[in-house]
Amino acid sequence: MRVVLFRVWPLLLGIVLIMLGNGMHFTLIGLRGGIEGFSASELAVVTSSYFVGFLSGARFSPVLIRRVGHVRVFAALGSFMSAGLIAFPLVTEPWAWTILRLLVGFCMSGIYVTAESWLNDAATNETRGKVLSAYMIAQTLGIIGAQGLLTLGDAATSVLFICASILVSISFAPILLSVAHVPTIEVARPMSLRKLYLSSPLGTVGIFLLGSAYATQAGMGAVFGSQIGLTASQIALFVAMLFAGALALQYPIGLLSDRMDRRKLIFGAATTGATFCLLGWVTGGHLWLLMVAAFFAGGVTTPLYALFLAYTNDYLSTEDMPAASGGLVFTFGLGAITGPLITGWAMQSLGPYAFWPVLSTTFLSIALYALYRMTQRTVAPMEATESYLGVVPTASPVAVEAAGAWAAEHAEAEHSEDLRPESDKA
């Protein structure tokens, strides 16, 4: 593992710095929006625009890279993103923030596509699983660390936005100075939603609903905290708990994923999420109960994303997996656009605590649909299932496809080992 990390540490360092800046800006939107008096529905539109940009970036960034190259695209998108972050406190109007978030989302998606291409190129078949796992940890630690940085300044000023911009700007140095080889980038055309649904109804519906839950947590969590009167430090801790839970629960859920019917695990994880969202709803604002609810509600979200990817691949041929990965990323993005809009409307109409019932209903819908699908399809044999690999929901199709390819190769190797005669194993 040390050898693997030595090869890719500049890339991972750059990713951590990018996530520090991007994670700061996500929470800052809720904090500063509350100070400026933006309504929940206005901030929901601002949140959704990020995911519109992110989805667009995932589609068009590979085209830009093929035309002008990785380095130019990476540098250009980084410059635009850094400028966008500084511009937020200059024009504090919902319409302006919507445009800026669209820009930042597009740039962030393109940055992911480029960085993940270099990261994937730096890995071998033997090390790809470890590299992708390290990438997932780097992203999550960056987001959690960003919440700590928010306590060092005042969201009412421009300082924290400037700090986020600086972090994004300097993040490109270790990446650009370490890459020597420029890889080719080939992202499969996404599978149509109809074909994806026919291949895996649970994977398609589930990942759409999960996109809604993830975007609500990541984008509206700070808005919720601001509207119920939490301090800036408490809001930062609340958002950090959403992602800390994902870091803690990823491994145990992944371990179970390769040992049982994944639909049962999806049902259990989604039910857990729904239950702790209800806990958050009935806390009456008790701080530490809110933190516990955030830890477990956020904790099951990222593992569920990886579960849906693995479960969908269980029913596909190896040739169809790249296209299905693109289709799942697109479906997740559609859900991410929709979720904050519904949550913002509910919070505007019913009060800030509607944040929790909306999330709980979303998780419950996943659980009930998983339960229904158990009656419609027989479980895939364990020897035919693909290996589970933790992939964060913010990953671009490049990382998702790489994870799918690694999982298929790893599962095939394990199955071949199991079929070997005992004498050969000895």
Image (cartoon, helix red, strand yellow):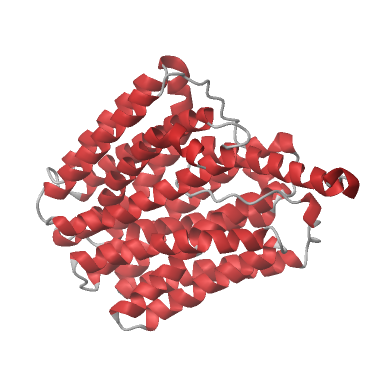
Q: Quadrant of residue 176?
A: top left
Number of on-image labels: 0
In this view of the protein, which residue sits in the foreground, 153 or 6?
6
Q: Residue furthest top?
A: 68
Please tell me which residue is depicted at 87% across the width and 45% down the height of the picture. 420
Viewed as shown, does residue 382 lie left or right of 86?
right
Residue 390 shows in this picture: yes
Residue 209 shows in this picture: no
Q: Residue furthest left?
A: 157
Relative to 284, residue 48 above or below:
above
Viewed as shown, does residue 257 lie left or right of 104?
right
Residue 22: percent from left, percent from top: 30, 45
Please tell me which residue is depicted at 48% across the width and 26% down the height of the picture. 62
Residue 157: percent from left, percent from top: 9, 52
Relative to 167, residue 146 above or below:
below
Please tell me which residue is depicted at 70% across the width and 39% down the height of the picture. 409
Viewed as shown, does residue 313 lie left or right of 291?
right
Relative to 387, residue 75 above or below:
above
In this view of the protein, which residue sits in the foreground, 10 or 389?
10
Residue 344: percent from left, percent from top: 34, 62
Relative to 142, residue 214 above or below:
below
Viewed as shown, does residue 180 lie left or right of 226?
right
Please tell me which residue is depicted at 46% across the width and 60% down the height of the picture. 246
